């Protein structure tokens, strides 16, 4: 089938599901710490203090325990089986070879991770693939693992664009939100002393596909940094005349899909009424589901040396496979009940270590083919 996806709820026909094969560690360096650093008041209480860099003697790499990796792989493969059982064609990224440990560019060296959270570094707008400008150095070449899938869609007629690739020197990143003057507290760590580079060009565009909420002809884009603002400007120019972009200022730290998701026309899953009050006026008229607060027993208990990356709201990160069917983490019965009260069919999916790997069901998937021939106008004018 040809590439076709304008929203997050139309009947899903084809999807890319990420791979966790040969994931081994997180690399602690400026871009990683900046991306996973909490600064939103409603997030801060949920993030543990990061471990100091260099704990394993290899730069700033924090190894991941084998049992977590084995269980993650089990859960991802079960996701593939569930999607297939629903009649959805599942595509997979190329496998990360275990011998590929790091990549080098003229400006940095970084470890390599597999293409697991495939929602982040690309986005589908109708019949076009856009590879976005990455924010984390270890993920700089991540879309290379998706090339075989993207190339097949291109052969079928898809458009394929790549945003300008950032140099990613220390000076490329907007660190203004995190300084030595940040509010004190054991959960916050300042990011200071960026190193100069002969390749410095100043702030660069960096933005993730998961910062976009697609609503047919309209696309909401979360902008929290100067890097995001440059990425938003590129998207706005690139999509001019085809789609309408709406800028959301700091609705979330980076990604929107654990803050607000559209489950079908007229129905949103929203983290809190406070978030709802900051949505565009036309969206505030939609029905909204406010999920129950996460409970401790919904998450594994980790050791002090385990690096936890996401807030406890990660399970809002659900995947709609049709306007009336949604995949939800099986560890969240109260959330499932809340969705069922709105006449949604819930498909439970096991996903144990979402907080260690920075993504839920929505993050791990990229919908490439959904039904529908043109973008609908849900917001008007």
Image (cartoon, helix red, strand yellow):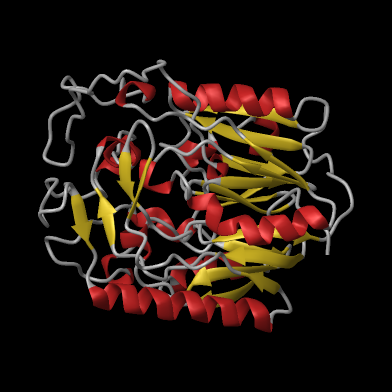
Q: Nearer the viewer, residue 288 or 346?
A: 346
Q: Is residue 342 at least partly visible in the picture?
A: no
Q: Which corner quadrant of the image does residue 68 belong to? A: bottom left
- Relative to the observer, which residue lies in front, 184 or 273? 184
Q: Nearer the viewer, residue 3 or 159?
A: 159
Q: Quadrant of the N terminus?
A: bottom right
Which residue shows up at 71% across the image and 22% down it?
A: 237
Q: The C terminus lies in which quarter of the figure?
A: top right
What's the residue at 34%, 56% (across, down)? Answer: 312
Q: Position of residue 301 (x, y in %)?
A: 21, 70
Res 215 visible: yes
Which residue reaches farthest right?
373
- Using residue 76 as the reference point, say whether residue 161 is left or right of it: right
State the image coordinates of residue 242 (x, y, percent, origin top left).
82, 32
Count of numbered tags: 0
Is residue 318 shown left or right of residue 154? left
Q: Residue at point 32% right, 36% down?
A: 108
Corner quadrant of residue 319: bottom right
Image vertical order of residue 282 relative to residue 7, above or below: above
Residue 80 position in % (x across, y down) = 57, 77
Q: In this image, 354 relative to 79: left or right?
A: left
Q: Is residue 69 above or below residue 204?
A: below
Residue 123 in the image: state x and y as whole percent.
63, 46
Position of 367 with respect to 65 (left or right) is right
Rendered view: 229 above or below 148: above
**Which residue appears at 10% of the width and 54% of the height?**
57
């Amino acid at each position: 089938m040809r590439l076709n996806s304008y929203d997050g709820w139309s009947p899903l026909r084809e999807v890319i599901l990420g791979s966790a094969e040969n994931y081994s560690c997180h690399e602690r360096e400026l871009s990683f710490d900046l991306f996973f650093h909490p600064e939103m008041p409603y997030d801060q209480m949920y993030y543990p203090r990061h471990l100091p860099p260099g704990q394993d003697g290899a730069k700033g790499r924090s190894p991941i325990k084998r049992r977590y990796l084995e269980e993650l792989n089990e859960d991802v493969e079960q996701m593939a089986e569930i999607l297939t059982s629903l009649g959805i064609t599942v595509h997979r990224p190329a496998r990360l070879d275990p011998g590929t440990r790091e990549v080098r560019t003229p400006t940095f060296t970084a470890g390599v991770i597999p293409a697991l959270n495939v929602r982040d570094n690309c986005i589908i707008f109708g019949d076009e693939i856009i590879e976005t400008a990455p924010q984390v150095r270890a993920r700089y070449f991540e879309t290379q693992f998706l090339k075989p899938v993207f190339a097949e869609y291109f052969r079928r007629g898809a458009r394929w664009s790549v945003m300008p690739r950032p140099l990613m020197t220390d000076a490329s990143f907007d660190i203004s939100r995190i300084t030595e003057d940040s509010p004190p507290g054991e959960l916050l760590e300042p990011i200071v002393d960026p190193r100069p580079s002969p390749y410095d060009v100043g702030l660069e565009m960096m933005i993730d596909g998961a910062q976009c909420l697609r609503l047919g002809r309209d696309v909401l884009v979360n902008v929290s940094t100067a890097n995001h603002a440059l990425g938003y400007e590129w998207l706005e120019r690139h999509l001019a005349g085809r789609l309408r972009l709406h800028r959301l200022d700091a609705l979330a730290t980076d990604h929107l899909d654990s803050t607000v998701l559209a489950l079908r026309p007229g129905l949103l899953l929203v983290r809190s009424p406070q978030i709802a009050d900051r949505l565009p006026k036309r969206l505030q008229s939609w029905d909204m589901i406010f999920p129950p607060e996460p409970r401790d027993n919904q998450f594994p208990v980790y050791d002090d040396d385990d690096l936890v990356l996401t807030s406890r709201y990660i399970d809002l990160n659900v995947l709609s496979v049709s306007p009336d069917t949604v995949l939800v983490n099986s560890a969240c019965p109260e959330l499932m009940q809340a969705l069922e009260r709105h006449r949604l069919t819930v498909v439970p999916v096991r996903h144990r270590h979402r907080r260690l790997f920075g993504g839920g069901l929505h993050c791990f998937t990229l919908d490439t083919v959904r039904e529908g021939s043109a973008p609908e106008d849900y917001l008007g004018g």
